[in-house]
Amino acid sequence: MIERSLKSLAQGLAKGEFSSVELTQAYLERIARHNPEINAFITVDPDKSLAQAKAADLRRARGEAGPLLGIPLAQKDIFCAQGWRTTCGSRMLENFVSPYDATVIERFDAAGAVNLGKTNMDEFAMGSSNETSYFGAVKNPWDPARVPGGSSGGSAAAVAARLAPAATGTDTGGSIRQPAALCGLTGLKPTYGVVSRWGMIAFASSLDQAGPMARSAEDCALLLNAMAGFDTRDSTSVERPAEDYTRLLAADAPAKPLAGLKIGLPREFFGEAERAGCDAAVMARVDEAIAAYRALGAETVEVSLPAMQLSVPAYYVIAPAEASSNLSRFDGVRYGHRAPEYSDLDDMYSKTRAQGFGAEVKRRILIGTYVLSHGYYDAYYRQAQRIRRLIADDFARAFKECDVIMGPTSPGTAFRIGEKAADPVQMYLSDIYTIAVNLAGLPGMSVPCGLANGLPTGLQLIGNYFGEARLLDVAHRYQRATDWHLQRPTALAD
Amino acid sequence: MKHGEVSSGWEVVIGIETHAQLATQSKIFSGAATAFGAAPNVQACAVDLALPGVLPVLNRGAVECAIRFGLAVGAEVAERSVFARKNYFYPDLPKGYQISQFEAPVVIGGQLAIQVGDSEKIIRLTRAHLEEDAGKSLHEDFQGQSGIDLNRAGTPLLEIVSEPDLRSSAEAVAYARALHALVRWIGICDGNMQEGSFRCDANVSVRRPGGPLGTRREIKNLNSFRFMQQAIDYEVRWQIETLEDGGRIQQATVLFDPDSGETRSMRSKEDAHDYRYFPDPDLLPLVIARDWVERTRAQLPELPVAKRARFVAEFGLSDYDATALTASLEIANYYEAAVQAAGVASAKPCANWVMVDLAARVNREGIDFGDAPVSAAQLGRLLARVADNTISNNIAKKIFDAIWAGEGGTGEDAADRIIAAQGLKQITDTGAIEALIDEVLANNAAMVAEFRAGKEKAFNALVGQAMKATKGKANPQQVNQLLRSKLG
């Protein structure tokens, strides 16, 4: 049962092969057995999950149907879920129980999905390894000595370890795509504004976007159908007609299904010298994936994204600036951690925040406060915004030449726990291929494209604005022709 | 200190920043209600509490208010303005930042005319921008702790900034009064200063005439015109004394203490906040379509300046009367409706009635003009009866009181009903009045004798007797005339 796709699970539920309660129970048992080692979940509440499963079974008994009715899903602990502890991976919110639902949670509830639990993550989504979580590092199911990537590392590890059939993630600079690549999953960061941010705890508001993490493009499409849609509670949510993201997937498979597709290969990824920025084995898998695409009928063209080299510095100005302000609300006054002892108001603030936040969060608050300060704003924040526009312009030019851009998702495979923890810049560079996509607001995916030294690698697909359906189709064609996405870690099989 | 003048060799320079609470039903970025006086924190929703994950959504009504204001002061309503975060920590500021506008405000420029003595002065406006109010910290009743009430958090404000064009406390107060009248006139603010709906900060400096601007100190949170006058006068004296004693003014924020009548420093420039303004990524730039501005313009009431001029031209009122009758939209509307019912010939008596009789009654009872039990149409019809000599002005006052008390019904013809019911129609029949006068003269021989002996007072007493005999219904001029001729 645990190897079945969402579509197949939905069929099983529809045919009565098993109930949602049985399915949920099966996953809860796996979580109970393996989570102590993997640490993918921060909060599991079997009573709540089973009550939801029972409700889903009742809905089905009353004649309801739907692709997610009764399907258990793991939710990143960044989404507020009513009655659930919602920590965002931080001591600051260790005991915060949300009184309301995020739009994403609300939509999954409406679709009848079951919340299996809240997954571990880097504290306030700041990290690329899941080592900054107050609730401890998450282990990569492919090799427990290694990181699962981050910040959606708990979700990635949960799906890779088959503790959940699929999960949600959020992506500010690569936080869906990078852990998907490092754990051998398919993950999609939609166009900024496609999924409502209401109830999703903000890291960097202009970059944050929620998306699905699953075992195939097809499963991602099913999840995105539930997640996406205009929401009046989020002013940056985009009002567009509802879309069926699976609509291009069902077509039959001719010999050259991708004939006519133009794939842009950025010189900044594939140039002679630039290739050196990426692990050679990873690059080899990416080259093989491109070759597979040519075999499916696609043609490749070289494109250029010259401003891309500035994406990491621009990102590490904009994201911390927004974060420094977004995290000001965690002040110990109304909810969350408050220092048990303090002498006056300023002392309460500083002790509360010194105790409640971890080192990486503090580092980014400091950077953000600095770049927004009087006298530095023009040199840093305003300059970074200009670079952001240049990057978006680069992509706009590139998409005149091609339909989709491809390259590596991450410059390496999963690294060892602790390997980069002491060197923030090395850690920041692990998002070098993904960050520009957030700065431009474009949709991006990571698709498994083979193993390097026994560890998963990811091919990144970048689409034009609102091109999710096409992007999912392009990924789906590859997954019909290859089986890398079906590979799973050999451990934890029981 | 006289307005606009140099005081003992110093010139006063004042600019005013005003926070006008906008009269919307709900908050600027959430759906919570804005009504004043509710129990603490019952009008604070998840957004106002700044729970993790919540997001702001702009209230269209607040934008509409800003457009109305921009149009009313002849300003530019920006096609595109930007909300920015003003970051600082305070317990009654739930997000740790206030959403305001910084580099790109919604209203740019504009001006306001104020009356200074007999002349008019134009005060330029710098800008007006939308922002949210903070909550309140309650320092009493909590024994060593503070309570936080977030009902006010997120209430929409329009911050209106003047240029430093004001030259005295009197000008500053005239400006604040004119602005106060205007925001109420165009219906964007209830102007309730006790409840904090309209509060001013005054930036005050002094300089040698023609010299460079002096260092300013900002007097915060002036919530009455009297305090504004007192605070500025004190501040100006203090600054001049300090400078004349060889001291220097440090830029500072000060508070006015009404009990001592003094201003005292709250914080100096050194510990001024660095607010780290940046565009709020949760809100798109505010784009105001031109047709929205034009639709709003069409709905805007005639503005006080225009109405004043029209009252002078159409109704022949003095500047003084026209100014008094345009003090608020309510009084102006009342007056105009009364004139319409009475006829333009009665415009001047209408003005007197509204400014004197009605104003006195309304003030005494503490109600608004619009809520007066005597409607404008009823008053107009009443005054029409005076104009056509059906009744005297004195009888009109009695009828006015009767309508106020609920007699005559609620229809426009209340006065006519009372006149008919009580037989108050003025006696103008000369024969009937003559007969009455003859009777009065016969019954009051002593008074007649006194009058003939040269006592003018006795004449008035005889008029009184005649009026009394007719229960006030005789035309007083007629009685006078006839009596004179008979005694002649």
Image (cartoon, coloured by chain):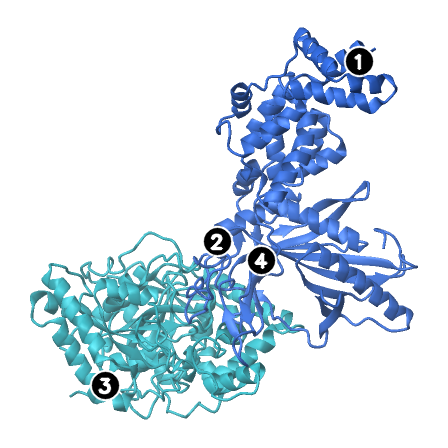
Q: Position of residue B205 (x, y in %)?
A: 80, 63
Q: Which tint was used for chain A?
A: cyan
Residue occupied by mark 3: A489
Other residues around mark 3 within 10 Å, as few (<14) / some (14–19) / many (≥20)? some
Say which quadrant the C terminus of chain B sits in: top right
Among the 4 quarters of the image, the one containing residue B266: bottom right
Q: Position of residue A239 (x, y in %)?
A: 38, 53
Q: Amino acid at mark 3?
A: Pro
- CA gap between label 4 and label 3 equals 66 Å
Residue occupied by mark 4: B195
Residue occupied by mark 2: B59
Of the image marks 4 and 2, the number of the one nearer the N terminus: 2
Of the image marks 1 and 2, the number of the one nearer the N terminus: 2
Q: Position of residue B185 (x, y in %)?
A: 61, 42
Q: Is residue A93 above or below residue B439?
A: below
Residue occupied by mark 1: B484
Chain seen in blue: B
Q: Position of residue B320 (x, y in %)?
A: 75, 35
Of the image marks 4 and 1, the number of the one nearer the N terminus: 4
Q: Nearer the viewer, mark 4 or mark 2?
A: 4
Which of these two is toward me, B472 or B366? B472
Cβ–Cβ under 8 Å for marks 4 and 2: no
- CA gap between label 1 and label 3 equals 123 Å
Residue that appears at 50% across and 83% down: A353
- CA gap between label 4 and label 2 equals 22 Å
Which residue is outermost to the top?
B431
